Amino acid sequence: MIDAGQLAAVLRDLIDGKREIRLKDPRRPWVQVAVGEVAFVSGDLTLVLYADCASLEHVVSAQPAGGEASTYEHWLMRDGANPVELLDDSERVALEQVLTQTA
């Protein structure tokens, strides 16, 4: 399982361009979702993110290939925060820009 701090570091790597990201389903891009889940793939990690009012609300889950998924509930129970909550405001804005540009 990936803890909230580890996944926040992955999100920062996405912001910094150290990791590539793509949509799991190109027919459901981030820019077309006002409310709901969108799945992305970064390396061997599948991320499901939740948008509300067309902005990033939280990470629903993160699952490495062949590994156990970490979930929203897991992070709240174990870490007391969702990985997105560990990003500062400027990082959240930058991450949303990355997601918007992802095809």
Image (cartoon, rainbow, N blue to C red):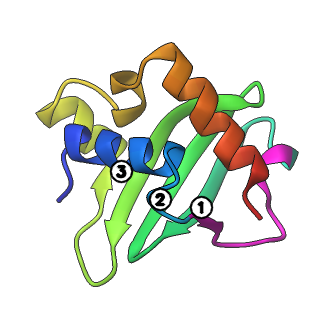
- Location of the C terminus by quadrant is bottom right
Crowd tier of the residue under label 1, counting other residues whose Cα lies within 10 Å: few below 14, some 14–19, many 20 or above: many
Q: Where is residue 66 in the image (x, y as percent from the top left)?
A: 27, 84
- Location of the N terminus by quadrant is bottom left
86 on left or right of 48: left
8 on left or right of 68: right
Dividing the picture into quadrants, the one containing residue 65 is bottom left
Q: Which of marks 2 and 1 is nearer the N terminus?
A: 1
Predominant secondary structure, magenta span? loop
**Residue that numbered label 1 is attached to:** 39
| Residue range of the region highlighted in magenta in the rendering | 21-31
Q: Which mark is residue 47?
A: 2
**Location of residue 32 with respect to 35 vertically, above or below:** below
Mark 3 falls on what kind of element? helix
Q: Which of marks 1 and 3 is nearer the N terminus?
A: 3
Tell which of 23 and 11 is nearer to you.
11
Q: Residue 10 carries which label?
A: 3
Seen at 41% across and 49% down, the residue is: 13
Q: Position of residue 44 (x, y in %)?
A: 38, 77
* Residue type beneath disc 2: Leu
Mark 1 falls on what kind of element? strand
Proximity of marks 2 and 3: CB atoms separated by less than 8 Å: no
* Residue type beneath disc 3: Val
Seen at 34% across and 66% down, the residue is: 63
